Amino acid sequence: MIRYVTRRLIQMVFLFLVFLTVTWFLLYILPGDSVALKYAGNPNIPPQAREVAMERLGLDKPVLIQFRDYMFNFFQGDLGVSFNQYPRPVVDIIGERLPRTLVLFLTALVTYYWAGFVAGKYLAWRRGNRGEMAVTIGGVGLYSMFLPFFAFMLIWFFSVQLGWLPISKFLDPEQWRDAPFAANQVFMRLFWVALIAAFAMFAANFAGHRSHSRALERILRVGGGALVIAGFLYYWFGTESGQSMRPYAGDIAFHMILPVLTLTLIAFAGVMLLTRSSMLETLREDFILTARAKGLPEGVIRDRHAARTALLPVVTSLVLAVATVIDGGVITEAVFSWPGMGEILISSVLNEDIPVAVGAFAFIGVLALIGHFVVDVLYGFLDPRIRVTEHG
Amino acid sequence: MRLRTKLICVLAVLALVAAACGEDEEAPEPTSAAAPETTAAPAPDTTSAPDEPEEMDEPEEMDEPEEMDEPEEMDEPEEMDEPEEMDEPEEMDEPEEMPMGATYRLGIFSAPTTDNPWAALDTEAEIWNQYVIPGQISLYTYQGPTYTVVPALASDPSPPQVEADGDAYSVTVNLRSGVTWSDGSPITANDAVFTFNTIKKYNGLGGNFPSIWPLARDDDPDTEDDESSQGVSSVEALDDYTVKITFNFEPGLAIWPLSVGLASIFQEAFWGPIVDASDDFETLYAASGLGAPNASGFDSAEWEPGAFWRNVALDSYWDSGSQYTVYSSGAVEYTTGGTTETWGGDPGGDVVADYTEGPFVAESLYSIYTDQNAAVLALTEGEVDFLLNPLGLQAGLRNEILAAPSLEVAVNDQNGMRYMAYNTRKFPMNDLGFRRALACMIDKDFVANTVLGGTAYSINSLVPPGNAYWYNPDITAPCAGQSTAERVASAVQIFKDAGWTWDVEPAWDEGNRDVIPKGEGLRGPGGETIPPLTLLAPGPGYDPMRATYSLFIEEWATDLGIPLSAEPTGFSVIVDKVFVGDPLLWDIYILGWGLTPFPDHVFDFFRSSNDSALGGFNTPGYSNPAFDALADEFDRAKTLADARDLIHQADAIIAEDLPYVTLFNTPLIEAYSNQLTFPYTTILDGLQNVGALTGVVTIG
């Protein structure tokens, strides 16, 4: 296993180098350059100013020298400075956008995977009834909706007609007037709190799963869940740091409802259908028949035997989706005025801001590689049928 | 299991709701207080209506004004609202008293990228930064709505003349006393000196700086005789309120006063230590400008990247309470401290604006909407009062806005043009007959009025009609007013007169209402056949109007037997090909320009020394010694009247020679809450061009 992991890590490094090189050159060969796009259309800016700009950005050097310099700096942790926001470091720009995207899209991802998995599980279990048909058709209908149109329908309904939710943006500027925190501080706090809660929940469930007593399992799970909730409430209401940040965190959470709802309604059907088909296959397996023959309760067969096995492709899909979450959604971010990584990706490519674009793609590449790696390793643990074997 | 899941869900939702809605008893320790002296938060009491942004493909420049419409009476300055207690989150900093008025809420369509006013003129010269960063001061400034050049820091009513000064030329400008930075300190000649010396220290900086503060480079032997070496040699403070600017050449209007006279001046006390501390300009640009002294009525108070920007009104703005009366002649009467001055000539014509300088709002709050539809919803729902967009609202949204009872609409001319350019370096575009014949076939009015339903209007001059002082109304389009049949006949005749021939000559078939037969085997005067030509134009996804024009032009060209195909092309690709790439690799293209009030572009775009092959803006490669002579004369022009005469002559030459065929312009539509009162709404390039008049708007 260690040799396998080592080999995979070496492959990942090599693959990343290839990815970075291809990305850099693809962006470089796009017609035009950042300086031309910015200055060519402004007759007030003399040619000399453009030359100065080219020199500043290093664009006057031969392409291979530019590439060499970029790679050299990249692996020293210097992603360069933005061409369009010179001299702002790329890391600074990504650091500004990443928390917003992570919090929104991870929340949406978890929500629609959870909704899709639960719905898929029940659809497969109660196959053939009217509910299955209605949910399937409804889910697929939503899945095929044009995202901007659907998002605007929801905005119109919930924000304009009912007035329950904000129209867009990730915070209410008037509430944040003179806020003692930057929005990114709050985003990061939300992220860590959610992450800690998720790990605690996972640990409680895992411990329960490992226990051999049904009663103990229940205690661990329910107790763990209750502790997490209590901890969550205590943090936001009982600690000074939580209290001071709570209104701002609440405001961001409030602004997240509509985009998360939109993404969930649009995307849950994909997970639902994946789970459903996986579950249907599992239900035909002999061990399910054996479980039934043993007289196990239906809920146990469904949740502990069938659903767990059916979870494998869903987990794969989830891990890979997590890996690409930082590219955000250009459309979602635009419609909900949530400028994050998606917006910076598209604008940097359009404006030929190569350092920012490559930097953003590098983040996605690294996460995707890690995601694939995690899936590979996880599969070995989750599915006893898959084991790494040594050849030769 | 199910019960447990439900319980957890309910608790989680309750916790979230509580977190979202809960309020704290205790005020938290502020960890970072960007709050300026005048914080506080009055409840906003305005409504508003936004619109959607379109892509801007070319930067806009400012331009010079003339007649405007009936002025709107400005309401008496309102009584300032009582500062209201802030009832929102108590975790906020201790609210301070709001000096006056309400919150002016504006929507913008892209996030500002810097708070540094230096960078905003150079590496980050984006319109969105310019909207939010409070203005610096200059010696002179454009006065809306007529764009008359009037004193700002200078005390001389008109810019003084440049005079010979030994081997050089200089101008001495007297400054007003009593003009102060937002921190209350006086603005003196030393600030102008500091600004120039800083630019000089950093080798002229980049972006807009070389055009607003052109640096004399007479120490460079390679460029000594070159135009690029011409600029400002020095700026000296003769005393606190007298500044002397020396040039190494005799500047015309375009440089003095319309570049240097309008150039930003920065405060030495704030920026000086930063400049002294570093030899590289990156350090200067990286410094935060939030709260930096400026000369407007607002201080930048808060910037939440990606979300909002907030400027707070100053308690003691130096120009607050001054009275401005602007006449359609361009003259301005300025009354302050009981004395009245008249600028820009004798008052004449209608009063187009009559107002008192504010600010009358407590703060300007700029929220970012990255989607136009969402922004319009926010405007109609009263979430913002005004949408700032250099391109205004999409025409399709106009009716929707008009239907909203809480909104008003202002429609203004844009200072810009969309045009078609021929590459005159290549056959057949180098043939005047070819250019005229194709231009003759282009029925601009038909496309604008019939096909595009009046959402655009055709233009003939290089200066749009909205820039009335400079506009030449005598310029007409080739074959203007002719029917299609007449255009075909005229184009055929133009070709024949120029020596062109066909195998099959095109003719108008009245019965079929079409050109039958279409031209075939068109040959130039020397018998040359025309190679396949490409018309590069933005695609319908980027600009459906220009895409539509390109399709019609392709069809009209085909009627004549010209093998022209319209090719929808990305904006950046066109820019790369025509401004940067090999000048022989394109044939014809369609793009657009945003322009400045002073229309020196008429010369910049066509003088031979400005050929794009040399890095200039003459993309057609047009070369005409008579035109170049006019351009040189324009460079030396000292009066507006002389400059206008030269502009008109140049415009007429280009209309004859047709390196460009001007096509159309679009009106700029803006919507705003009917709770807002502006001293004027008719202005070239719309209210967005004057920052939505934050300094004089009243609310309620």
Image (tube, rainbow, N blue to C red):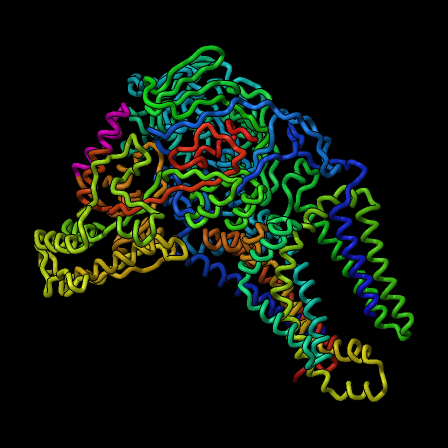
Front residue of B194/B518: it is B518
Give x and y (percent) for residue A279: 70, 79
Give x and y (percent) for residue A93: 57, 48
Give x and y (percent) for residue B529: 14, 62
Front residue of B681/A110: it is B681
Q: Is residue B258 visible?
A: yes
Q: Is residue B459 left or right of residue B60?
A: left
Q: Is residue B304 left or right of residue B489?
A: right
Look at the picture and state if B148 lies above or below B465: above
Which quarter of the picture shows residue A143? bottom right
Quadrant containing the N terminus of chain A is: bottom right
Q: Is residue A72 visible?
A: no
Look at the picture and state if B403 lies above or below B255: below
Quadrant containing the C terminus of chain A is: bottom right
Give x and y (percent) for residue A292: 81, 86
Which quarter of the picture shows residue B428? bottom left
Look at the picture and state if B252 lies above or below B659: above
Which quarter of the picture shows residue B556? bottom left
Instruction: Look at the image and say whether residue B6 sits in the magenta stretch.
Output: no
In the image, what residue occupies the spot 71% across and 44% down? A248
Instruction: Look at the image and say whether residue B646 sits in the magenta stretch.
Output: yes
Q: Which region is colored magenta?
A: B625-647
Q: Is residue A156 left or right of residue A55?
A: right
Q: Is residue A113 left or right of residue B601?
A: right
Front residue of A221/B677: it is B677
Look at the picture and state if B553 lies above or below B156: below
Front residue of A222/A94: it is A222
Q: Main secondary structure of the magenta part?
A: helix
